[in-house]
Amino acid sequence: MNETEKVTDGDTIKILCPRLILTRREPGLQWLIGSPFFPPFTIISTFKSIHTSSSSSPDFIKESDDLRTLLIKGFDIIGGLIVGGSSSDDGEKNAREVIVWAGKLRELVIGGGGRENLENRELIGAVAGLSGGDVKFFVERRGNVTAVDSVVYEENQEKFVWERGCLFRCNLPIKMPVYLPVKNKADAEKMYLRAAEVVASSFKDPLVTYMVERLSKDISVNLHPALISVENADVIQVSVLFNRSGKSPKSSAPFAEYIPALEEARLFVVDFELEVLCYVAKDLLLMSAISKLIIPALVDQFNSMKKAVLPKLLAQHPQLCSYHFNPPGLLHPITVIYELNYGETELKQVEVRRSLHMRLGLPFDRPLLRIANALDFSMMKDGSGNSSKRKGPSLLKDVHIGIPSSGVSGGVVSLVQGSYEYHHYLQDGFDDSGWGCAYRSLQTIISWFRLQYYTSIDVPSHREIQQALVEIGDKDPSFIGSREWIGAIELSFVLDKLLGVSCKIINVRSGAELPEKCRELALHFENQGTPIMIGGGVLAYTLLGVDYNEASGDCAFLILDPHYTGNDDHKKIVNGGWCGWKKAVDSKGRNFFLHDKFYNLLLPQRPSMV
């Protein structure tokens, strides 16, 4: 029965995750993720195995603890991919081994009710070499391993996922009071665990009511979105109502029983801030969604937090909070539990995020899993899908996209990486015409750091910028509220104080020398990718890129001009030249950069961080 045979006609491995993610040639083991709501053998993502036992097999306990939290209900482990380590002749042998591993991990993650599903559902084993070539797929059905030649990469991945399903979200704060003996740690832990078992079992109590409602009250919102993604997927809110009134069979007077403690005891109130997400097929009955997905998710998250509290039970409890993320390259959300007692820059928190980046195949120099990156479901209540938290009207973003070319023949274009907001004169009803251009350039730069999730602070006002300079001792208190101009040096001070961002400053004696810096500026945009502030005389601009022909020396500068005073009309801004390519000397012989002024260029350095 264990012979390798060709899979029957019609069976296909369907791959939703981007091809490069699945076929990256990193040695090791990746878990293949699918969903019971998809056709069999449909792979939506891969998670790298990062815990290994002494026998070089996965550490299943640690892996299952991680994935039970990380992987939202509605998705599960459907196989494994092993990269490198053996010759192609051992493909079936390796596939068998990884199928066994995936089955064991799947059973641990699913828990008590998962064994029957495991036996009835097929698993995938895949093998790949380090030197390239196609991934070889095998599937196992009740002991039979079959090779699969038919592999299809889905083109409309997000549409495939979000036309079939939606997100159920349930947040449940719990305060668990428990009296514990302060001098007997072992007994305290037993009593705490017993109390926690009672709480966990209450989720399944028939007297508990689960109320289901849609976040968006507008029925026209998100039913048939043009672009289907996590951000505009349907989100269903689930609320848990515990204190349901009941009718007592007998009438009696209220009473209380007093039982004195045998030793010194203290009341501890343990806080659990539960928030779970589940992926649910749109044709699944609500009762089934609650019983099969929401309740198991609440139990799993409660148990994970319960374990985290246990080592510090009689001391200061960790402040635990769950967050949901949708990092680039991943088609579905994930859930992470962070300890908030310390800041995000604390070493332990950095290591937690680093291990998550490793598991998800994310770069180690981008902050993709910080709290500021978390999905904000409060912004979905109006169905707008706009994740900006800025008060007042939203600002134009990425104004340079779609502008005409620079006119540099044979040049190489190097541009800002990521998004930014366009800040300019007279915005927010604040009159800074004639003196606030550097403030506006700084606001654009800080918006870039916000939109790339390096910080969660709001873009500072002119007064807040001035306050920061006074606090570090660069300016006198009278500077606050003034109309005094600032330059590159002051901007570097503010970025350091508010964001912890360091800057490089280039000094140029004359505007005529700026083209000589094009090579250096191109390297900045390629390596750092941040907007640059150019200050000369009493004028400041934001530089978004350069177009440079190294052979001829011809170049152009992509300027975002903060001196614009009109409304935020993209066409008007581009046609008016407020965002566009500028040559040092235009076709009429006019100098854009003044030859009798020196210039300072502020180059913010992208933090290398997770």
Image (tube, grey):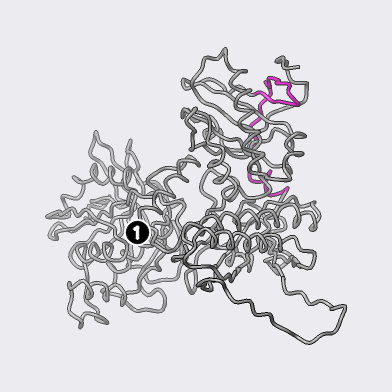
- Report the side of 487 relative to 209 (left or right): left
Rendering quarter of residue 464? bottom left
Q: Nearer the viewer, residue 524 or 138?
A: 138
Residue lying at the far right of the rendered structure: 249
Q: Vertical placement of 545 versus 574: above or below? A: above
Residue lying at the far front of the rendered structure: 262
Rendering quarter of residue 219? bottom right
| Location of residue 15 in the rendering, given as x and y in whole percent from the top left corner | 64, 34
- Report the side of 204 relative to 521 (left or right): right
Q: Which residue is mark 1?
A: 560
Magenta-colored span = 138-164
Q: Vertical placement of 531 versus 80: above or below? A: below
Residue plotted at (58% across, 62% down): 192
Please identify the quadrant where the N terminus is shown: top right
Q: Vertical placement of 204 versus 104: above or below? A: below
- Report the side of 492 relative to 525 (left or right): left
Residue 372 visible from this viewpoint: no
Q: Vertical placement of 328 versus 444: above or below? A: above
Residue 163 forms part of the magenta stretch = yes
Residue plotted at (73% across, 31% down): 122
Hey, what amino acid is under mark 1? Answer: Leu
| Location of residue 523 in the rendering, given as x and y in whole percent from the top left corner | 28, 42
Rendering quarter of residue 17? top right
- Report the side of 508 relative to 332 (left or right): left
